[in-house]
Image: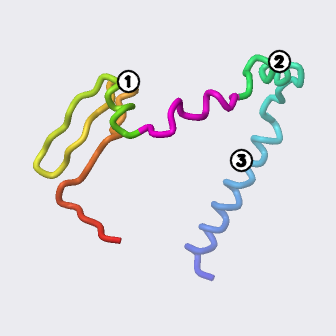
Amino acid sequence: MDDQTKNLILAFALSLAVIMGWFALFPPPQPDPADTVAQSELIPPPSAETTTPASGDATLAQPLEATARIAIDTPRLTGSLALTGGRFDDMQLRDYRETV
């Protein structure tokens, strides 16, 4: 082995020893079991009523109309930006075509 390979292996081994020594000397705090039980009691499990849509014929236009949006219209891209959360959730590329 040449010196560069030896130095690389030595640096890796020493770095690993420092990291393992750090976790041995300063372990992360363990959560109290009472706190985790209390938190799980505060958060109710999602019910089937909240996860199912109100109507079976929900389309993309209905949720898009329900929120405030900024329209985006460029030569290569169309869509809108939701003001709540600032997400690009309705984007279409004009020059991209995919056939199935």
Question: Range of the magenta residues?
Answer: 46-58
- Mark 2 vs mark 3: give the one in front: 2
Task: Say which label, 2 or 1, has the lower sequence index.
Answer: 2
Residue type at numbered disc 2: Ala
On screen, residue 47 versus residue 2, left or right, reads right
Residue 19 pos. (x, y %): 71, 47
The image position of residue 32, as x and y in percent, is 86, 23
Residue ID for mark 2: 38
Q: Position of residue 18 (x, y in %)?
A: 72, 48
Relative vertical location of residue 53 with respect to residue 68 in this rendering, above or below: below
Q: Nearer the viewer, residue 81 or 19?
A: 81
Residue 91 lies in the magenta stretch: no
Judge the density around disc 2: few (<14), some (14-19), many (≥20) Cα neighbours within 10 Å. Answer: few
Query: Is residue 52 rendered magenta in the image?
Result: yes
Residue labelled with disc 3: 19
Whole-Å distance between the Cαs marked 2 and 1?
31 Å
Q: Which residue is mark 1?
A: 84
Mark 1: which amino acid?
A: Thr
Viewer-closest of 97 and 37 = 97
The local crowd at label 1, few if under 14, some if 14 to 19, many if 20 or more residues have their Cα within 10 Å, is: few
Q: Amino acid at mark 3?
A: Ile
Residue drawn at point x = 19 percent, y = 48 percent? 77
